[in-house]
Image: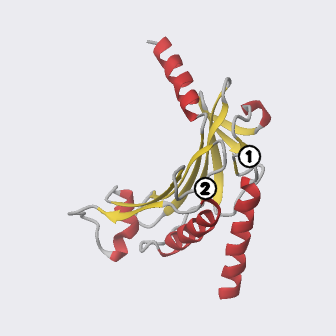
């Protein structure tokens, strides 16, 4: 069991190392990639697409990109598989810890937020996932460009978080935000204002 977990963790680290390379990329998608160059599963909204990524990871079952015609891809998000029948959050916390360790090996130190709000109604150990669902608990880690992190050029930030759909079903989100995100937001906002 321990040997299998060690092999899985090593494979995770190798996958992320190969995915980051010299240029900023996420799951094999580079910053600024034109949406026409990707395999689009469906258009979620005008600038958000569900895609098939070149380098998938076993923890994630779907992927989205935020992209504009002018700037290309500016954000990639991996949406994790369901960890169900897990009221205590045992399996999702373990998967989160493995991913966090792999990402820390690549990007350096992170900023961690693991807390439950004061006066939370759902504060028992068997209510760990329910507290997430009710927005009373948070488990998130960020890597941003600072003296502790080592993000490649073109990548502004990486976020890893846990979210929940019910009292016993949670999943992980892994987001990569490129340094053209401001341009994508400006383009989207200009288009929104043009419709008023």
Measured along the vertical axis of the image, is residue 45 above or below residue 88? above
Measured along the vertical axis of the image, is residue 31 above or below residue 166? above
- Is the residue under label 1 in contact with that under label 2 (CB below 8 Å)? no
> Label 2, on which residue?
150
> Label 1, on which residue?
23
Label 1 sits on a secondary structure element that is loop
Q: Name the quadrant containing residue 140.
A: bottom left
Taking the image as shown, residue 193 lies to the left or right of residue 50, namely left
**Measured Cα–Cα span from mark 2 to mark 1:** 13 Å
Residue depicted at x 76% and y 38%? 38
Of labels 2 and 1, the one closer to you: 2
Closer to us: 72 or 153 = 153
Dot 2, crowdedness within 10 Å: few (<14), some or many (≥20)?
A: some
Q: Name the quadrant containing residue 132.
A: bottom left
Residue 1: tell me if it is visible.
no
Label 2 sits on a secondary structure element that is loop
């Amino acid at each position: 069991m321990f040997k299998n977990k060690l092999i899985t963790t090593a494979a995770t680290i190798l996958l992320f190392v190969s995915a980051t390379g010299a240029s900023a990329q996420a799951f094999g998608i580079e910053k600024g990639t034109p949406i026409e160059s990707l395999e689009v599963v469906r258009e979620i909204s005008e600038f958000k697409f569900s895609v098939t990524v070149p380098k998938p990871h076993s923890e994630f079952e779907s992927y989205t990109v935020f992209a504009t015609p002018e700037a290309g891809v500016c954000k990639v998000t991996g949406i994790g598989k369901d960890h169900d029948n897990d009221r205590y959050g045992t399996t999702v916390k373990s998967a989160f810890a493995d991913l966090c360790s792999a990402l820390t090996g690549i990007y350096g130190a992170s900023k961690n937020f693991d807390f439950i709000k004061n006066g939370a109604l759902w504060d028992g150990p068997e209510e760990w996932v329910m507290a997430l669902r009710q927005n009373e608990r948070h488990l998130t880690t960020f890597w941003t460009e600072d003296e502790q992190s080592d993000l490649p050029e073109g990548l502004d930030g990486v976020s890893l978080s846990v979210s929940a759909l019910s009292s016993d079903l949670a999943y992980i989100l892994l987001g990569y935000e490129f340094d053209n995100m401001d341009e994508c937001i400006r383009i989207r906002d200009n288009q929104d204002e043009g419709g008023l």
